[in-house]
Image: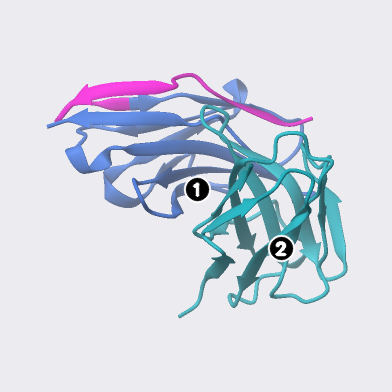
Chain colours: A blue, B cyan
Amino acid sequence: AQSVSQHNHHVILSEAASLELGCNYSYGGTVNLFWYVQYPGQHLQLLLKYFSGDPLVKGIKGFEAEFIKSKFSFNLRKPSVQWSDTAEYFCAVNTNAGKSTFGDGTTLTVKP
Amino acid sequence: DGGITQSPKYLFRKEGQNVTLSCEQNLNHDAMYWYRQDPGQGLRLIYYSQIVNDFQKGDIAEGYSVSREKKESFPLTVTSAQKNPTAFYLCASSISPKRSGRAGDTQYFGPGTRLTVL
């Protein structure tokens, strides 16, 4: 069975600090990897995704993630966070069978 | 506007009653999903469907049922057998792996329905 583990449940940072959120998955076959974000009061939306090719992918608002196949990891990074990045972040995997699995989520609070 | 609609936004039911949550999409997506979101537990997959008239159980299907009679609609019934039905329910849709030929694509989410069972 596939699973997704997010290492940080709640992260608190000051503006301009760097961010890295960990995500590891377990699945033996082909997967697509995603980070979704849920801003307060808004729908869950895509931040970035990895299907194939360059393992370093860039998303919206300056976020990026690196797929390391040997470590089954897909960590999310941002060099300098802003107050508006305060949100809940979810890592997810989708498989060829169409099934998707989400991590438990990480709540990011950015202090102005 | 293209998107996913879920209704109602808030729903209250008495214990022991079945309740059906609506999910409609006009994105022409083949795949649709139902999730339950509880604090600290992320999104847990209840059911998913890759094509009309076909659906599969997710990780927490017990006490729930679905139907997929039309491409644009994927209603979820929370039955009286569900032990802890009070939760936030999210519906999503995407291009199906069967159509794209690869693992599942980006999911587009609705606004959710908050169900409270009294």
Residue B21, disc? none
Q: Is residue B49 magenta?
A: no
Q: Secondary structure at mark 2?
A: strand
On the image, the x and y values in percent for residue B108 come to 54, 60
Q: Is residue B7 left or right of residue B62?
A: left
Instruction: Tell us which disc is closer to us: 2 or 1.
Output: 2
Q: Chain of mark 1?
A: A
Position of B72 relative to B50 (above/below): below
Q: In this figure, which residue is indicated by the disc labeled 2?
A: B31
Crowding at label 2, few (<14), some or many (≥20) Cα neighbours within 10 Å?
Answer: many
- Give the residue type at disc 1: Lys
Task: Tell me which chain the residue with mark 2 is part of.
Answer: B
User: Which amino acid is tagged 2?
Assistant: Ala
Left or right of B40 on screen, residue B45: right
- Magenta-tinted stretch: A1-19
Name, please, the residue furthest toward the right.
B53
In depth, the one of A35 and B62 nearer the eye is B62
Residue drawn at 60 percent across, 41 percent down = B87
Q: Quadrant of residue B102?
A: bottom right
Quadrant (top left/top right/bottom left/bottom right) for the N terminus of chain B:
bottom left
Q: Is residue A88 visible?
A: yes
Residue for point 79% across, 30% down: A1
* Circle 1 SS class: strand
Q: Which mark is residue A49?
A: 1
